[in-house]
Image (tube, rainbow, N blue to C red):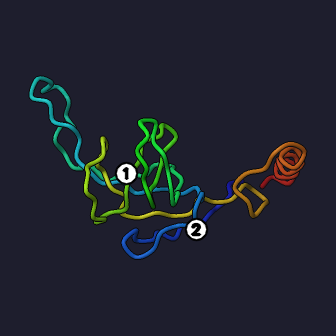
Amino acid sequence: MGIRAEVEWVDSRERLPGDGVPVAAAITGRFASDDADERDPDAGQEFWLVRPMYFTTRHFAEDGREYRDCFVDSDGVVRLPYGRDRDETLEFDDPITHWAELPTLPGTNVHYLLGEEAEAARANALREGT
């Protein structure tokens, strides 16, 4: 039996998540258009997609640049909230239009557990079929 989770999307222009919160992020942008590669059917087209990220009030990129109030993915790519003024463009300049908190772990009210707590919660969720 599956578990259902409700998602409440929040406009990133209106409110941002708390520091360190894992989120589903709606990213908008345009696929790169390379005239040399006409075989790519998506080249040059606009996109809007969802990726898991986390929000942070302060992030230092590998190149040493500091970012404030940004979303970061598992590859370290930094994205800013939609419509935010900025002095410089990012390597990946595709902003976050909306975000939603990720669901908690099955049978819990948290996003992560460690050690014995993780083992016990996982065993309970699997035993109860949640």
Asked which secondary structure carries label 1, the reply is: strand
Mark 1 and mark 2 residues within 8 Å of each other at the beta carbon: no
Which image quarter is the C terminus in?
A: bottom right
Q: Residue at the location (40% across, 57% down)?
A: 26
Looking at the rendered structure, the kind of residue marked 1 is Leu
Q: Residue at the location (41% across, 64% down)?
A: 98
Nearer mark to the viewer, of 1 and 2: 1
- First in sequence: mark 1 vs mark 2: 2
Circle 1 packing at 10 Å, graded few (<14), some (14-19), many (20+), is: few
Residue 54 position in % (x across, y down): 54, 53
Name the foreground residue: 26 vs 89.
89
Residue 96 position in % (x across, y down): 37, 58
Q: Residue at the location (52% across, 57% down)?
A: 55
Circle 2 packing at 10 Å, graded few (<14), some (14-19), many (20+), is: few
Using the image, tell me which numbered label, if any, was put on residue 49.
Answer: 1
Name the foreground residue: 87 vs 81.
87
Residue named by callout 2: 6
Residue 5 position in % (x across, y down): 62, 63
Image quadrant where residue 7 sits: bottom right
* Left or right for 49, reference 99: left
Asked which secondary structure carries label 2, the reply is: loop
Residue 113 position in % (x across, y down): 78, 50
Image quadrant where residue 85 sits: bottom left
